[in-house]
Image (cartoon, rainbow, N blue to C red):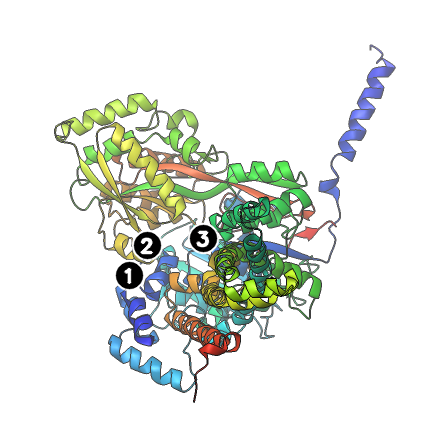
Amino acid sequence: MSVVIFLLLRLAPGNIVDILFSTGGYVSDADKKLIMQELGLDKPVWAQYVEWIRNMATGDLGKSYRYDVPAWQVIKPLIPVTIELAVLSTIVAVLIGVPTGVISAVRQDTVFDYALRIFSLAGLSMPSFWLGMVIILALAAWLGWVPPMTYVGVREDFKIHAVQFLLPALAVGYRSSALITRITRSAMLEVLREDYVRTAWAKGQSEGAVVWRHALTNALLPVVTVIGIEFAFLIGGLVVTETVFNLPGVARFLVQAILWRDYPIVQTLVMFIAIVVVLSNLFVDLLYGWLDPRVRYSG
Amino acid sequence: MPRLRPIVVLAAVCVLTAAIVATPAISQTPKSGGVLTVMQREDLPQGFAILETSTISSVWPSMPCFSNLVIFDPLKKQESVDTVIGELAEKWSWQDTYRNLVFFLRKGVKWHDGQPFTSKDVKYTFDMLRETPDAAGKLRINPRKDWYANVEAVEAAEPHTVVFRLKKPQPSLLLMLASGYSPIYAAHVPAATYRTTCVGTGPFKVKEWKKAEYVEFVKNPDYFIKGRPYLDGLKYIPIPERGTKFAALQAGRLDVAFPGDATKTIAEQVTKAEPRIKATITGQNVNDNLLLNVTKPPFNNVKLRQAFSLAIDRRGVVQSVHQGGAAVGASMAPKPFGVWGMLDKDLASLPGYGKAADEKAKAKKLLAEAGHGPSNPLKVELATRAIPQYLDFASFVINELKQVGVEATLKQIETAQWHPLATRKEFQAGPNLTGIGIDDPDANYFENWACGSPRNYGGYCNEQIMKMIEAQSQELDAKKRLAMVIEIQKKLEADAGRPTIAWRQDYYLQWQHVKNLIPHQSIYNWGRMQEVWLDK
């Protein structure tokens, strides 16, 4: 993974020195050489890679080329913002997606089903950044109010913090919920036709018990997989939402860092995203075992 | 003597009273306090290191920290030699027929870290900018070295006197020193430090720069102008997304916009939705131009250059690309905002400025003379930066060229690659944007048109025009100089070395409660904020 990240970045045309000169509107080859030396970019790529890995192993993530401060110092405050937004969006997605999927399956081919399917199809068709932009513009036009443009900490003002995160979480969560709705519905439809569900109905169990306890528990496996994938995707995929709501998160910053060819920042952020994806998949795998005893490994 | 009717007298009294009541803005007493929230286009590209950058994204949020020797009066909207006022220099004097410029510095000025400011700091700054062999500091990138090419020496014989010795007279030097691009750095602070923080003598001190989130300033209690600044602080908030930033302004999360960011259409929408936000129309000193690589075919052929210049309908660019938010002008910013621009009647006589159909017919004729027609169309690749401001303009240019039979294709160049490509002259033609620090012929011509200048991307070099540029630079009589500059503009347009197509206008947006923030005709020079106050 580290090799791929490292090499792909170097394959992109231009580097930080070119960008620096762009802000100056000219290029001086002699000065360019000096800055390349200063940043260690004059060394062969393999030597840069070895140095990066060696420094990573000792906890040194390098220095941001753009900001001239340690990369970790720049990245550290961004991580909680993105994690919080991704978690909240996932919660919103689950809260909307699972119940609507269940209701849609239980009330198959009724007006409810059709309405909920249209609702979920609309979610899939609407990019979250578009929805976010509509929310911002509508708030400004109708209420003359928009969320704060700088990050408000949870201890600073809980209410404002909640609003600042809930609006983007709604925009992102709605899109993710659409996928969850569709997966939940199809999984539920399959499970509802199983013999044990028919037996549960025959035993006279309440609808709630049959649907939510017996059927949903068994239909959850594919849903959990989708939730896991969506969460992992959100960590790196919140670029436009963070930009629209001006939230100082990882994704928005990553794009800026790529545009600036700020290698230490990009490499660290991509590694962070990769780690989150691995951990999130691991968590989903562990969840399988808890949800379905058949999946557990025997000693 | 005829007697006035009572009704006339009453009307006159009413008009007078109304006039007095209607001018409170002029007579209002400034109030101290408050924090101004300011729109910022992007996070600071290179911190507060103004001397190492050429972008408004750095100058705008860094200016409040610094002071210059002199500055353009923040309360006057048009910058010129008459609006230059002292800043760190209490007064100045031209001597030896404009060969020596002597500055008498303020006493008792302190840097934000408490160190005293002296003439050594001035010498340190300008030696570093000029890259003299004995300079105590070095800039990583030095985009404006050419501004000071005529300075022979900077002498700091006494702690509060500095002498700029020039190779030849250059009245414009004072204007360059008044630009937002010419702050004085502290000699005791390494130049690299300014990339992360700011030690200046300006009205505001850096409180915190939270990367990608905000830059916060607090009032400098030791500021050398008593009673200034009025504000307690400033907060610059980078908001890259255009829709979000103007929604934030409309909703009151921001007090003022970023210079040059609001188009005419946006300004109209925002002021209609929120009448308490006002738009001030002014120049930007930024123009759309067409780079032509004159160092190789086909544009070493003047006829083809002229054909390209004639083919592009300048008024069409103003209407289509800028929705009316720009003005037609030659190589100096047009009036009424610019000082050196040509009058409309003079402009009309220049090639490319007449009726579009007539000019296109002339272009076709020139192309035919150069051997290009329907059977042998001229094929050209246009290179431009892959960002919307450039692409909109480039698309228009391609369409215009098509109308005269030129087959133009567009090559989009990523920002990182644009300047290396332009500097190496690895292009044929390129729709381009050029921002000029100050509205002055020296700043523009020596930077963008002079033979050998690194920012003369097309490599245009005309010895005769170069002599004219040198001559206007040394001319001491303002009227004569203006006449010389008009002549240069005519010749440059006729030679079509780098046709100027349109000058962008700014529709600067700010809430009515913000007072004394007056946009100038160049976006780079009015961000000091020491006179700004809030009426709320």
| One can see residue A72 in this view | yes
Dot 3 and dot 2 residues touching (CB under 8 Å): no
Give the amino acid at mark 1: Pro
Q: Secondary structure at mark 2?
A: loop
Report the side of B323 relative to B517 (left or right).
Answer: left
Q: Do marks 2 and 1 both belong to one polypeptide chain?
A: no
Q: Residue at x 52, y 50 (%)?
A: A120
Q: Quadrant of the N terminus of chain B?
A: top right
Q: Position of residue B404 (x, y in %)?
A: 24, 28
Residue at mark 3: B176
Q: What's the distance in space between the residues labelled 2 and 1, CA to CA?
A: 8 Å
Residue at mark 2: B414
Residue found farthest to the bottom:
A299
- Residue B460's mark? none
Residue found farthest to the right:
B6
Q: Residue at x 16, y 27 (%)?
A: B374
Report the side of B518 relative to A195 (left or right).
Answer: right
Q: In the image shown, does B241 or A244 lie closer to the viewer? A: A244
Report the side of A186 relative to B153 (left or right).
Answer: right
Q: Position of residue B284 (x, y in %)?
A: 48, 43
Instruction: Tell me the chain of label 3.
Output: B
Q: Residues within 10 Å of mark 2 (few under 14, many from 20)?
A: some
Residue at mark 1: A13
Dot 3 and dot 1 residues touching (CB under 8 Å): no
Q: Position of residue B252 (x, y in %)?
A: 66, 50
Give the amino acid at mark 2: Glu
Give the amino acid at mark 3: Met
Q: Secondary structure at mark 3?
A: helix
Q: Is residue B88 placed above or below B13 in the rendered structure? A: below
Q: In the image shown, does B123 or A130 lie closer to the viewer? A: A130
Q: Secondary structure at mark 1?
A: loop
